Amino acid sequence: MVDFVSQASFPVLALAITAALIALNAVWSVVGVVAERGFRHYRVWAVDLRPGQLRWEILANLRFDAVVGCFIAALLASGAVRVSPDPSAWLSWATFGACWVTFEIYYWCLHRALHTRPLYRFHRWHHESRVTTAFTGVSTSSVEALGWAVGFGLAPILLSTFSEVSLTGWAFYFLYNYSGNIVGHVNADFFPKAMNRRGLTWMIHPITYHALHHARFVNHYSFGSSFMDRLLGTEWEDWPALHERVRDREPMQSLAQRGA
């Protein structure tokens, strides 16, 4: 794989990476649909989808994969990211960890910026999905998709200034990001009640947590963790109560619903 990446031209890399991302997206979308049906007793919202929502989300997914695929291919073809031909396990874990920490911080900043008046027009597409599905996670505008692509490449670019990076570690981060983002948008919360304890949710949060962002538009800007929201004061206080209701098989009946 490393030999292919180092020798392939930009068009070939772009096609190969985009195809891989589409396949990854498709597999986890199926997992998300199955999970949503399997945990249907724990629906987050008892609210209908908007007409045509699944169609526009799927089309946006393909666009997202193409934008990200081309951007990552450009980083590799240009040498902006230097890939190790024989990465150690330590380098693979370091690459994954650097991607995780960097993206979590970067994404909060990007997401918060996209909710400002001058930039919201680039984020509006994602918020057309008020009730989320397995296809909502990467349903974005082209500009927002480019913002995500920068986040995916940020840690490898920085690491490449003083070290090579592990292609394996980077690839596993994509697996983590895509799987978590897709499954994390389904309209069912399979996280147990214990996960509404704030002390357990610094690194990961239940599905209800992000579902409230789509309903309320403000706060909960984090990606897979909650530490940025908690540190910067953008966390809703009622999400644990709402998560408990969902796990008690009491889906929210209105997008305006509030917890105790």
Image (cartoon, helix red, strand yellow):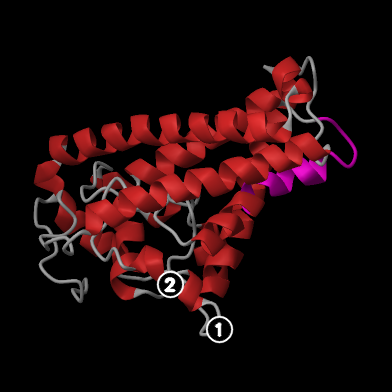
Image position of 102 (left or right of 163): left
**Residue 43 x, y percent position in the rendering:** 15, 51
Provide the residue span drawn in magenta. Answer: 151-164
The magenta stretch spans residue 103: no
Q: Which mark is residue 118?
A: 1
**Residue 130 x, y percent position in the rendering:** 26, 66
Image position of 100 (left or right of 155): left
Q: Secondary structure at mark 1?
A: loop
Dominant secondary-structure state across the stretch colored magenta: helix
Three-letter code, disc 1: Pro
Location of the N terminus by quadrant is top right
Q: Residues within 10 Å of mark 1 (few under 14, many from 20)?
A: few
- Quick one: 18 or 2, which is closer to the camera? 18
Q: Which mark is residue 219?
A: 2
From this view, report whether residue 129 is shown above or below residue 190: below
Residue drawn at x 20%, y 47% as measured from the top left: 188
Image position of 196 (left or right of 13): left
**Residue 175 x, y percent position in the rendering:** 50, 32
Q: Which mark is residue 177?
A: none
